[in-house]
Image (cartoon, rainbow, N blue to C red):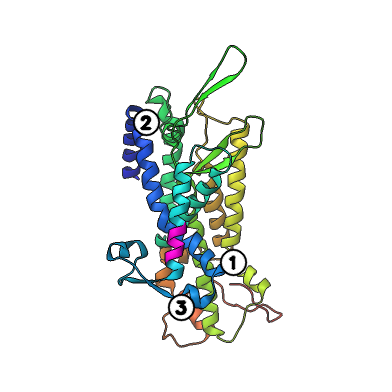
Amino acid sequence: FIISSVSLIGLFFIVSKFPRFTVITFICLFGLGSIHASSYFCTRPLVRALLPRHLGFSLVRIPKTLRCCFESETNVVTVEASVGMLMAIVMVVVWFVFRHSDTWVWIIQDILSISVTCAFLLNIRIPSLRLATYLLTAFFFYDVFMTFITPYFFGGKSVMVEVATAGTGTERAKDNFTCERTETEKMPMLYLIPRLDYLGGFSVLGLGDVFLPGLFVVYSLRVDYLKMRIFQRGNPHHRFTFIQFLRSHRYYIPVCLSYSVGFIVVILANVFGLTINGVQGQPALLYLVPFTLGTFFVLAVYNRDLSTLWNLSLSDLEPEQDEVGSQSEQYENVRQVQEDVLDDDNEISIY
């Protein structure tokens, strides 16, 4: 939290002095970082779906210097991996060359941003509800402070907005009732959402506003899957129907819906101009954190899971592979929440 605050304020001063150089640096870093992410989550699955299996898994030799690009310990990779990586490189190059276009390049940028987000969520996990609460609460106040409060200290400028919109250009009204816009470079770590009103242009959503709630959404999904695994340890031959599978997501689906509702509230707050100090923007975590975290806490209290999830990490709750015993014993020892997992009609009562 402290590192993030110091880094953002430092970046604010750097952007003020060297806006173009700073934004170009971030564009290059974002492009390089998104190559591997978009290859893993976008182009390689596409190649796998289009190429015949025997061709996709054929082996090709690569130079030793390219091992790191494929995370390979040898000089041999599959055709799927090599073609997928090449397509990802082409996609990033196209985005870089045409990044000033306002017609279609935003689609590629959003694809790259989604890939980077997925890579982040794949590699970083929240171990416990306690840590998730502390983390999201800290960044809740961080986002509000950097967006709405910093104008008191930096001459009316919002640190968060200035950094996020660095290089977006300027607009000036001319005498013939037209608007002259000077376009420069844009910060790339953003989701671009086309505006459908008469103003046109794009609304932006920072990757951090997806990363942080996304970590908690992934945590809620891991909780649901942990409970499903515990149930299946005592019922190894049971197979979930589709409806039962959906019902088993007692945390994940509501938290996803609450995030969507929170995002809609962010949009409405922008539309109706709810702001402090005249800041043109919203701290999205101001709305997303209460909606997601609050929904999870309400469900945890209802399902009698709060004490267990607060005091223990998911790794502590994971059943041992060699564990032997009835389902009720496993559930009592690991979760200590509800006593039964079957309802009166002998259907699954999802924990």
- 326 shown above or below 98: below
Mark sitting earlier along the chain (1/2): 2
Which of the 4 image quarters holds residue 79? Answer: bottom left
Residue corresponding to mark 3: 333
The quadrant of the picture occupied by the N terminus is top left
- Pointer 1 with pointer 2, Cβ within 8 A: no
What amino acid does circle 2 point to? Pro
Residue most toward the right?
345
Residue 129 visible here: no
Chain-order first, disc 3 or disc 1: 1
Could you tell me which secondary element the residue under label 3 belongs to? helix
Per the image, label 2 sits on a secondary structure element best described as helix
Quadrant of the snapshot with the C terminus? bottom right
Residue 27's spot in the image, x, y percent? 40, 42
Q: Callout 3 environment at 10 Å: few (<14), some (14 to 19), or many (20+)?
A: few
Residue behind mark 2:
19
Please tell me which residue lies in front, 222 or 303. Answer: 222
Q: CA distance from mark 3 to mark 1?
A: 22 Å
Residue 288 relative to residue 67: left or right: right
In the displayed structure, 95 sits above or below 245; it is: above
Residue shown at 34% from the left, 34% from the top: 21
Would you call the spot at circle 2 few (<14 residues within 10 Å), some (14-19), or many (20 or more)? many
* Magenta-drawn stretch, dominant element (helix, strand or loop): helix
Amino acid type of the residue tagged 3 in the rendering:
Asn
State which mark lies toward you, 1 or 2. Answer: 2
Q: Using the numbered discs, state the Cα–Cα distance from disc 1 to disc 2 in whole angstroms.
A: 46 Å
Magenta stretch bounds? 82-87
Q: Which numbered marker is on residue 249?
A: 1
312 or 72: nearer the eye?
Answer: 72
Q: Amino acid at mark 1?
A: His
Report the mark closest to the observer, 3 or 1: 1
